[in-house]
Image (cartoon, rainbow, N blue to C red):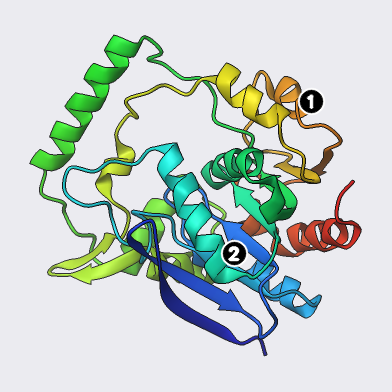
Amino acid sequence: MTDVSEQKVTANGLAHHVIRWGDRPVDVVFCHGFLDVGWSFDAVARELVTAGHGVASFDWRGHGQTEWVGAGGYYHFPDYVLDLEELLPQLSSGPVHLVGHSMGGSVCAMFAAARPEKLRTLTLIEGIGPPEVEPRDPTTRLRAWLDGVAEVRSKTPRPMQDERAVLKRMRAQNPELTDELGLFLASKSTTAVDGGVRWTFDPLHKTWSPRPFQADSFGKLLETISAPTLIIAGERGFRLQDEQERMAKIEGHRFVEIPDVGHMIHWFEPQALASELVSFFADDGP
């Protein structure tokens, strides 16, 4: 039976919720994606512990049980990078296998470019950056952000009845969610309030970022990544028009596609994902 523990670790001024699997020193750190939680790697982590690794994950700022930003704050990608900078030394005494999914993968790629000495390997699961989406015009984008923040702050959130209601919402995007997995994720992604439960993520996450994603700038970061890198995609996952160009910027990377799965590979194919990770970590690269 795998030992699992939870603790709060302060990084960049915020109390981060950290989960650890196994009793070995941490050498693998998972970073979840947008509106997900660290607990979502539970099945993968248990496989890695069986393979001899010490594993940790955490909730990003404004997600799960990690603190939200304070009054007047917002969520920018460099903030996540600084969180990781201060969090990693408290999780492991040496370089780690850093694994990021989706948004977490984008942050991990940025971190890998800036701090190569802190990584043994880098794994990006459906995580080579978001697409460039509208509105790209900076003035239109800024207006959308201002309007979105104003709307969030003017609303009183309505609680959901219970975790079954949460699961129903989650199935709108992931209809294959089983009761067991779905209710587990629902329990880790909500908190009890008067009248039911609410999501633990900060509603500000659902507003437009004030600055559009710039693929050219992100590509320059990808070009400087020197850690051995594994890129994992789901056969039915998100596809970018320029994904081949982005991947080619990471010298010597390895690419794996896991069949018959979509974007949430760690939810629906944890054993297949763990197998690829264990093999890659054993080689320490391509």
Q: Which of 205 and 281 is in front in this view?
A: 281
Residue linked to disc 1: 248
Q: How many C-alpha atoms fall within 10 Å of the one at disc 1: few (<14), some, or many (≥20)?
A: few
Q: Quadrant of the N terminus?
A: bottom right
Query: Residue 108 lies in what quarter of the image?
Result: top right
Residue 179, given in percent of the width and then of the height, sits at: 50, 68
Residue 95, given in percent of the width and then of the height, sits at: 70, 61
Say which amino acid is labelled 2: Phe
Is 234 on the left-hand or right-hand side of 278? left
Task: Give the mark nearest the N terminus, 2 or 1.
Answer: 2
Give how far apart the Cα atoms at labels 2 and 1 are: 28 Å
Judging from the image, what secondary structure is the residue with disc 2 in? helix
Q: In this view, does 45 lie above or below 220?
A: below
Residue situated furthest bottom in the rendering:
1
Is 136 on the left-hand or right-hand side of 271? left
Q: In this view, does 156 lie above or below 144?
A: below
Residue linked to disc 2: 41
Is 25 on the left-hand or right-hand side of 156? right
Q: Which residue is drawn at 16% across and 51% down?
A: 157
Residue 37, given in percent of the width and then of the height, sits at: 46, 60
Q: Which residue is drawn at 77% across and 32% down?
A: 250
Judging from the image, what secondary structure is the residue with disc 1 in? helix
Report whether residue 171 is seen.
Answer: no
Q: Nearer the viewer, residue 191 or 71?
A: 71
Mark carried by residue 194? none
Say which amino acid is labelled 1: Ala
Is 39 on the left-hand or right-hand side of 282? left
Report whether residue 105 is seen.
Answer: yes
